[in-house]
Image: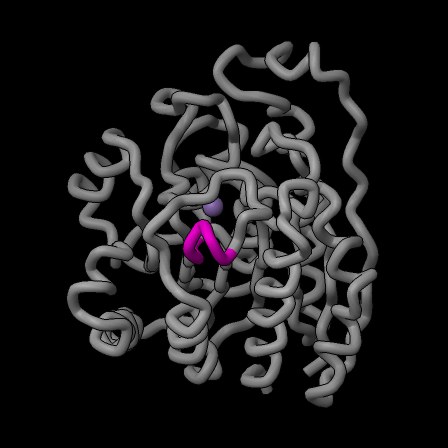
Amino acid sequence: MIINMIGVPLFFGSDRKGVDEGPNKLRENGLEAVIEKYGHYLYDLGNLFVKNVDESHKFSTDKRMKYIDEIVDVNTNLAHQVYCSLKSGCFPLVIGGDHSLGLGSVTGASKYYDDLGVIWIDAHGDINTHETTATGNVHGMPLSAAMGFGYDRLVNLYYDGPKVKKENVFIVGARDLDDDEIEMIEKMKLNVWTTDYIKEHSINKTMDEVFQKLKERDIDNIHVSFDIDVLDKALVPGTGTPVEKGITTEDAKSILRTVLETGLVRSMDIVELNSRLDKGDATLRTTMNIIDFCFSIIK
Ligand SMILES: [Mn+2]
């Protein structure tokens, strides 16, 4: 496969510096070789431009969301990069950066593929909106915006209207959901497999169910958005919003294996590595291990 690596050095969505260093940290530690050893050819398209903004301006456009202008700009550019990459027959690998970039990726992929499926592997739901957010951090909103809920400029990013049908969204590994998010999941009947569910029913049964649902929906093209905080806090100390009682690296690989072996995954995000918070590069190693595993399966 020809891989287009797109770095997104963005921390505005998490309001925690260090996560913007993720793409370069992975490059400096051999990301290219990890991917190319499986016979892929990697074009590193570099990092997207992210404007430098003084912290005192973070709420200057909207009191409810931090850095919204810059997040919209970066995500619009990302959407276009992902779209162009797919159009040229390549596989966009988007390296974060915080998870607000998931909106740009899904948007680009959905412009190219009708009826896109989205697998959101994350400890969080990322389905808050400007009306429900407790923090104002946009990395908690990309998935709701992609489904067409929330702030107008996020919902209508790059092209007008929803980017993915809510029935085509599959959230796996969630365990830190806000009350409003739980309400939304129930109201919208979203497909969610929590960490508790995985632990109670086993990863294999869970992934059988995910696989069945994907088949029922007749999905031919999938975007995978992998937030490393889906892993247990002990495995990923170097992430901005770690959550305990998470899944193991092996479980994460089982999820990815099931999804990638369908042969339907066309694009992917890896987000939220924050090396400034890391303990002896443990999170870097875990992230690299996950990426290595993915590209051993992607054909
Ligand atoms: Mn996330």
Count the numbered circles shown: 0
Question: Can I make out residue 293 in this image?
Answer: yes
**Of 29 and 204, which appears nearest the observer?**
29
The answer to whether 195 is drawn above or below residue 2 in the figure is: above
In front here: 109 or 140?
A: 140
x%, y% of residue 14? Answer: 57, 33
Q: Horizontal placement of 219 versus 152: left or right?
A: left
Q: Residue at x 79, y 30 (%)?
A: 51
Task: Identify whether 188 is placed above or below 220.
Answer: above
Prevailing secondary structure of the magenta residues: loop
Magenta stretch bounds: 230-235
Residue at image position (80%, 50%) is: 47
Q: Quadrant of residue 146?
A: top left
Residue 157 image position (x, y, % from top left):
56, 38
Q: What residue is rendered at 59% in x and 84% in y?
A: 296
Q: Quadrant of residue 126?
A: top left
Query: Taking the image as drawn, is residue 169 in sight?
Result: no
Q: Is residue 234 magenta?
A: yes
Q: Is residue 28 above or below residue 139?
A: below
The residue positioned 34% from the left and 59% from the top of the image is 172
Q: Report whether 4 appears left or right of 260.
A: right
**If the image is split into quadrants, where does the N terminus sit?**
bottom right
**x and y, in percent, of residue 37 in the image:** 74, 86
Where 249 falls versus 170 (above or below)? below
Expressed as whole percent of the image width and height from the top left, the position of residue 78 reads 68, 48
Does the magenta portion include 17?
Answer: no
Q: Is residue 273 left or right of residue 260?
A: right
Position of residue 161 in the picture relative to residue 298 (left or right): left
Q: Nearer the viewer, residue 218 or 206?
A: 206
The quadrant of the picture occupied by the C terminus is: bottom right
